Every structure is written in structure tokens, then in C-alpha cells.
């Protein structure tokens, strides 16, 4: 018995980080914008469509991006702004379906199967989501509608930016088969090259190729999956977001840092962000850790860098930034950091792990009042930021000289 067709939407915010920067700074609108870190060492986190027209793409080394687009405007990322826009984005999606699977800050699948009578035709739903994103977030979304996740994700991408493509069950194979094999889910450059070596250039070519021969070439795991996708088969359900395993924040510096006091200030900022994300996810952490990368050739370490990870189990689960900072600072103090090659710090990160629901019962302690006070302070700061913006409360050590 054939299963009834599903209705899956994929919604993707176009050039998300760069679009938030252009939204918040009118002087950047219409200009090539690259979001990233150091011009010398960084990688591109996002690029506006004006920069993409010159070949710039995410994950590209910043130095290469600036060779392709030397007049690009490089801005540092503002994760607090992106996180706030993301929260509002998912609140919009939640109004259309209880089945929302987050893929990242800026994209998600929705299962709308059987909701046409309540919400209207899938194209209308996609248009309404796009309209709300534009009105409430001042951002642009692209939407793909299809009978399964694989086709819906391609459909959202095919007409970017500001796209809306609906692929019906009758149109599915006609939509998929002319596309290049690189569009198949999970196909990277190596697999694409292996498929091309077999004379398979399009998804339709893969669909017509004997599956046994495909399995012999690509193996028993990859071969059957690609054959099924090429036939238009994808039974993966939309899965609502699972609790994260860890929450972290890290930064690669423009110049190496060797002063422990400077690194402690960075840790403070990172763990403030981590603690806020814990609270908003209604989680507590039982483990805190740091990641340090030394930027100098060290014998025996590939690539000339040495990365160290240190972690500590906390006495009690917490979402209190002060507790996380104390533990992370103690971990940092154990590391040999000084102003000489091999001891200067290129990257520093902090993370919280061993996560559990905030409402989970925990054993009361003699200092319970103090523990609760720290978390209540964090809750109050979150409410202030929600009402007045991220910049309403900042630590003095993080203020610019002109503030």
C-alpha cells in the first residue's frame, strides 16, 4: 500500500547573518558585505548576495574572499542579534505547525501534512510565512514545498533569494531528474566525482543506473540511499528539535593573546552568552570546559597548532554565568600561557555540557539561596534584553572606550 503524500516545507532565511547586518545598518544595504573575523586568518561566516556575485561564499578563507571582492565591507559577527532574530523566526514557524525541525539558526523543515483545510494551500502558507518574516523581522525568506525533505530543501534553494517553489507529487521526478548529481543529499566532491566517472551527470542518470552497480561502486550505505533519493523516495520524518548535547562559544583572535587577564575578559563574555542560551533553552549544565589553540608551530602537532580542551564537572547543575566563569577561569589558570612562541593563544572557546532540564529536581544545598539568586539575576537580565534590546545591560569590562 502506497503511503499518502506528505506536505513538507523548507524555510531558509536568505544570507541570514549578512542580512541582519544590512537590516541594522542602512549604510550596508546594497553593498557587498562579508561577516567574519580577522581579514588575515578568518573565514567567511556569511556573505550578502552583492558579495556572492563575486564568488564569495561561506566557509571560504577571508583572504581569498577579499581577493575576489576587494571592495567588500567586512563586519564582525554579532551573535546576540542573530540569536534574537532566530528566536523570533522560530516563533513564527511555530504558529504554522507543531512539527518544526530546526536545522540551524536560519532554516527549518515544517510538516504541514493534512493541514490544508485549517491553513490553506501549501503555496498560500509559504507566502504567509514569507510575508510575516518580512514584516516582523525585516528579513527575506525562501520557501520550498515538496512531498519530502530532500526535494523541499532543493526547492527553497532553487529560486533564491526571495524564492517560493512548490513541487507537487506529479512534478517531483520532472523537478529532480534534470538537476546535477551534486544536488543529491550527502554528495560531496569526492562522491560527485565517482558518479561522474560512471557517466552519471544528473539525478535522472542516477535513477536509471542499476542500483546493484551503484552499490558496488559507492558501498552498501551510500549506494542505496542515493538510488532511493534519485527515484524521488525520502521517508525521513520531520523531527522536532532535540535537546542540545552542549552549548558553546569560541573566537579566533585577530592577533595572538598572551595576557591571561585579556583571556579572562574574553571568557567572561563567552560564558555570559552560553549562560543566556542555557536559560532560554530551560537547561542547566553540569560540566564547563574551555578550548585553547596555540598559534605557533609545535613539534609533533599537525598544521603547526596545538589545541587543548579542559573540562570540569560542577558541584551542582547551573545556568548561572558567575559559576561557569569561576570554573572556566580556574581551568585557564592551569594552562601555560605566556608571550613566547607556542604559548600565545590564537583561539579561545568556552562550552557547557552535561545538560539537563532546568525543571529537573536537584538536591538542595546549604547555599541554595545563593545558587537561586544567581539564576534569578540571569532571568532578569534576559527579560531586560527582550524588552529593551541586547545592549541595555553590559559588563563594564566589555564597554568600548567611547561608551
Image (spheres, rainbow, N blue to C red):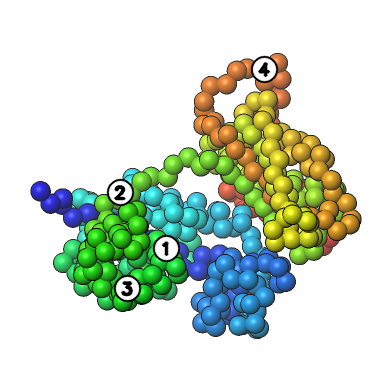
**Residue at the image position 76 percent from the left and 36 percent from the top:** 326
Query: Which residue is disc 2 drawn over?
Result: 237
In the image, which is nearer the foreground, mark 2 or mark 4?
Answer: 2
Residue 382 shows in this picture: no
Q: Which is more N-terminal, label 3 or label 1?
A: 1
Query: Which residue is disc 1 drawn over?
Result: 12
Real-space CA distance between mark 2 and mark 1, rounded to the nearest whole angstrom: 18 Å
Q: Which is more N-terminal, label 3 or label 2?
A: 3
Q: Which is more N-terminal, label 4 or label 2?
A: 2
Real-space CA distance between mark 2 and mark 4, rounded to the nearest whole angstrom: 43 Å
Callout 2 secondary element? loop
Residue 197 shows in this picture: yes
Within-10-Å neighbours for mark 2: few <14, some 14–19, many 20+: some
Callout 1 secondary element? strand
- Residue 72 in the image: x percent, y percent? 63, 79
- Residue 361 in the image: x percent, y percent? 53, 21
**Residue at the image position 76 percent from the left and 38 percent from the top:** 331
In the image, which is nearer the foreground, mark 1 or mark 3?
Answer: 3
Callout 3 secondary element? loop
Query: Which residue is disc 3 drawn over?
Result: 198
Query: Which residue is disc 4 drawn over?
Result: 365
- Residue 304 in the image: x percent, y percent? 74, 61
Q: Which is more N-terminal, label 3 or label 4?
A: 3
Query: Is the Cβ of the residue at disc 2 closer than 8 Å to that at disc 4?
Result: no
In the image, which is nearer the foreground, mark 4 or mark 3?
Answer: 3
Within-10-Å neighbours for mark 1: few <14, some 14–19, many 20+: many
Real-space CA distance between mark 4 and mark 3, rounded to the nearest whole angstrom: 66 Å
**Residue at the image position 53 percent from the left and 40 percent from the top:** 245
From what the image shows, is residue 108 above or below residue 284? below
Judge by depth and name the residue closer to the eye, 309 or 71.
309
In the image, which is nearer the foreground, mark 2 or mark 3?
Answer: 3
Amino acid at each position: 500500500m502506497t503511503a499518502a503524500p506528505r506536505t513538507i516545507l523548507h524555510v531558509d532565511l536568505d544570507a541570514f547573518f549578512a542580512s541582519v547586518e544590512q537590516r541594522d545598518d542602512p549604510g550596508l544595504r546594497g553593498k557587498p558585505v562579508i561577516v567574519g573575523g580577522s581579514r588575515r586568518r578568518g573565514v567567511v561566516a556569511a556573505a550578502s548576495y552583492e558579495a556572492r556575485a563575486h564568488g564569495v561564499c561561506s566557509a571560504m578563507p577571508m583572504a581569498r574572499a577579499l581577493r575576489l571582492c576587494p571592495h567588500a565591507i567586512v563586519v564582525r559577527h554579532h551573535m546576540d542579534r542573530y540569536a534574537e532574530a532566530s528566536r523570533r523566526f522560530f516563533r513564527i514557524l511555530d504558529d504554522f505547525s507543531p512539527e518544526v525541525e530546526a536545522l540551524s539558526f536560519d532554516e527549518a523543515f515544517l510538516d504541514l501534512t493534512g493541514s490544508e483545510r485549517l491553513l490553506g494551500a501549501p503555496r498560500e502558507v509559504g507566502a504567509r510565512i514569507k510575508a510575516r518574516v518580512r514584516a516582523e523581522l525585516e528579513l527575506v525568506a525562501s520557501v520550498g514545498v515538496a512531498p519530502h525533505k530532500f526535494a523541499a530543501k532543493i526547492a527553497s534553494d532553487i529560486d533564491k533569494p526571495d524564492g517560493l517553489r512548490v513541487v507537487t507529487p506529479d512534478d517531483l521526478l520532472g523537478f529532480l531528474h534534470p538537476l546535477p548529481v551534486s544536488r543529491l543529499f550527502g554528495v560531496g566532491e569526492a562522491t560527485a566525482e565517482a558518479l561522474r566517472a560512471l557517466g552519471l551527470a544528473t539525478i535522472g542518470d542516477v535513477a536509471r543506473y542499476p542500483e546493484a552497480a551503484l552499490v558496488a561502486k559507492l558501498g552498501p550505505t551510500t549506494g542505496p540511499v542515493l538510488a532511493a533519493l534519485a527515484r524521488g523516495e525520502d521517508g525521513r520524518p520531520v523531527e522536532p528539535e532535540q535537546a542540545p548535547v552542549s552549548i558553546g562559544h569560541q573566537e579566533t583572535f585577530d592577533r595572538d593573546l598572551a595576557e591571561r587577564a585579556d583571556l579572562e575578559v574574553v571568557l567572561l563574555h563567552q560564558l555570559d552568552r552560553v549562560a543566556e542560551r542555557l536559560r532560554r533553552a530551560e537547561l542547566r549544565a553540569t560540566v564547563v570546559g574551555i578550548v585553547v589553540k596555540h598559534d605557533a608551530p609545535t613539534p609533533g602537532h599537525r598544521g603547526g597548532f596545538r589545541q587543548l580542551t579542559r573540562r570540569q564537572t560542577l558541584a551542582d547543575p547551573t545556568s548561572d554565568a558567575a559559576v561557569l566563569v569561576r570554573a572556566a577561569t580556574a581551568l585557564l589558570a592551569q594552562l601555560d600561557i605566556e608571550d613566547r612562541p607556542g604559548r600565545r593563544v590564537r583561539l579561545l572557546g568556552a562550552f557547557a555540557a552535561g545538560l539537563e532540564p532546568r525543571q529537573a529536581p536537584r538536591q538542595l544545598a546549604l547555599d541554595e539561596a545563593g545558587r537561586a539568586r544567581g539564576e534569578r539575576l540571569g532571568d532578569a537580565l534576559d527579560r531586560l534584553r527582550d524588552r529593551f534590546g541586547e545592549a541595555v545591560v553590559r559588563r563594564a569590562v566589555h564597554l568600548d572606550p567611547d561608551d
